[in-house]
């Protein structure tokens, strides 16, 4: 039996969490594996798995794609990944690294 997933609902769940955490300015893509958004973190579903990866400026996968059987685990990992990205950029700016793109979450990190 194949379970029918409501991707619009799941997308809304993740977007609500992103808004709750104040991460809306980050580049991310939800349930659109074919999107070519550069520098984005992607959460998508393929072959019965929730998958998460990050993409570079040409939308090539950076690192490896992490797979989850459970949506809640995938959502938690995805949000943690976004939060870690913010902190990494803040720390990077302090030591002179330039972020991939501008965001109010780290643009004032040097202040």
Image (cartoon, rainbow, N blue to C red):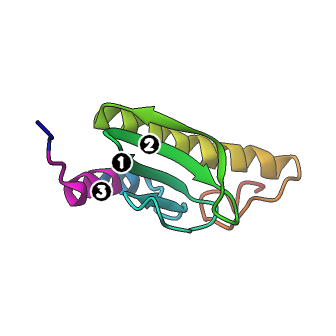
User: What residue is rendered at 60% in x and 58% in y?
Assistant: 105
- Asked if disc 2 and disc 1 are in contact, CB closer than 8 Å, the reply is yes
Is 26 situated above or below 52? below
In percent of width and height, residue 99 lies at: 75, 58
Say whether residue 4 is left or right of residue 51: left
Magenta segment main secondary structure: helix
Residue at horizontal 82 percent and vertical 59 percent from the top = 98
Q: Which of the two labelled residues, at mark 2 and mark 1, occupies the earlier sequence position?
A: 1
Q: Mark 3 points at which residue?
A: 11
Q: What element carries label 1?
A: strand
Q: In this view of the protein, which residue sits in the foreground, 18 or 47? A: 47
Secondary structure of the residue carrying tag 3 is: helix
Question: For the residues marked 3 and 2, what is the alpha-carbon distance in whole angstroms?
Answer: 14 Å
Residue 10 is inside the magenta segment: yes
Mark 2 lies on residue: 51
The x, y position of residue 48, in whole percent, is 31, 39
Residue 37 placement, left or right of 31: right
Q: Which is closer to the viewer, label 1 or label 3?
A: 1
Which residue is disc 1 drawn over? 45
Give the label, 3 or 2, closer to the camera.
2
In the rendered view of the protein, which quadrant contains the N terminus? top left
Examine the image and state in which quarter residue 12 appears: bottom left
Residue span colored magenta:
4-15
Q: What is the x, y in percent for residue 43? A: 43, 50
Q: Residue furthest right?
A: 96
Residue 7 is labelled as none
Q: Mark 1 and mark 3: span between their CA atoms?
A: 11 Å
């Amino acid at each position: 039996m194949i379970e029918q997933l409501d991707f619009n609902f799941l997308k809304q769940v993740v977007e609500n969490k992103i808004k709750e955490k104040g991460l809306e300015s980050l580049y991310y893509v939800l349930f659109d594996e074919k999107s070519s958004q550069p520098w984005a973190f992607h959460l998508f579903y393929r072959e019965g798995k929730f998958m998460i990866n990050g993409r570079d400026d040409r939308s090539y996968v950076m690192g490896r794609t992490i797979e989850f059987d459970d949506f809640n685990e995938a959502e938690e990992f995805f949000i943690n990944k976004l939060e870690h990205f913010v902190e990494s950029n803040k720390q990077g700016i302090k030591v002179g690294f330039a972020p991939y793109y501008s965001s109010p979450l780290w643009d004032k990190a040097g202040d």
